[in-house]
Every structure is written in structure tokens, then in C-alpha cells.
Image (cartoon, helix red, strand yellow):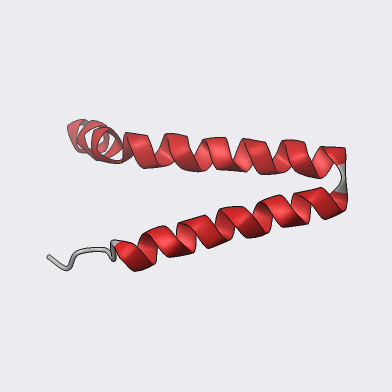
């Protein structure tokens, strides 16, 4: 149980950011499908650029 708490503590910021992006995309899709596609494209581009600038570190 402690391992799960430590894992969640380390990734809490990332989980909240991804959840926020998901909610924004869902809300935009409910407004209009084309606007939702643009929103999803921007979200994926931002995630891709973030990963490209700071790739995961090998242990």
C-alpha cells in the first residue's frame, strides 16, 4: 500500500494535468466535433513537444 502512495505522490502532477486536458477535450467535443478535433490535436502536439524536450530518463 505504501508503494502505491509513493508512486501516486511522484506522478500526482502529471495525473492532474492529463485529467484536466481530457476534461477540456471532452467539453470541446460536446460543443462541436470539429472544434474538438482541433483541441485534441493541440493537446497531443503539446504532449509530444513536452516529451521531445524532456525525454524519459533511463535508470
Query: In the rendered image of this protein, does residue 6 appear above or below residue 55?
Result: above
Disc tally is: 0
Q: Quadrant of residue 54?
A: bottom left
Residue at horizontal 55 percent and vertical 35 percent from the top: 20
- The spot of residue 38 in percent (x, y) is 73, 55
In the picture, the quarter occupied by the N terminus is top left
Q: Tell whether 38 sits left or right of 4.
A: right
Name the one closer to the observer, 36 or 5: 36
> Considering the image in quadrants, where does the C terminus appear?
bottom left
Residue plotted at (76% across, 41% down)? 28
Q: Is residue 52 above or below residue 40?
A: below
x%, y% of residue 27?
A: 74, 36
Q: Is residue 30 left or right of residue 13?
A: right
Q: Which residue is at a point 53% across and 38% down the rendered structure image?
A: 19
Q: Is residue 9 above or below residue 35?
A: above
Residue at image point 79% right, 44% down:
29
Q: Residue 22 or 3: which is nearer the viewer? A: 22
Looking at the rendering, which quadrant does residue 42 occupy?
A: bottom right
Q: For residue 57, what is the image quadrant?
A: bottom left
In the image, residue 55 lies at what x, y percent? 29, 66
Q: Position of residue 4 (x, y in %)?
A: 26, 37
Q: Residue furthest left?
A: 59
Q: Is residue 42 left or right of residue 18?
A: right
Placement of 27 over or under 48, stated as above or below? above
Amino acid at each position: 500500500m505504501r508503494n502505491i502512495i509513493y508512486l501516486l505522490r511522484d506522478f500526482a502532477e502529471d495525473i492532474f494535468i492529463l485529467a484536466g486536458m481530457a476534461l477540456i477535450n471532452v467539453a470541446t467535443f460536446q460543443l462541436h466535433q470539429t472544434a474538438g478535433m482541433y483541441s485534441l490535436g493541440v493537446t497531443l502536439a503539446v504532449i509530444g513537444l513536452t516529451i521531445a524536450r524532456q525525454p524519459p530518463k533511463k535508470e
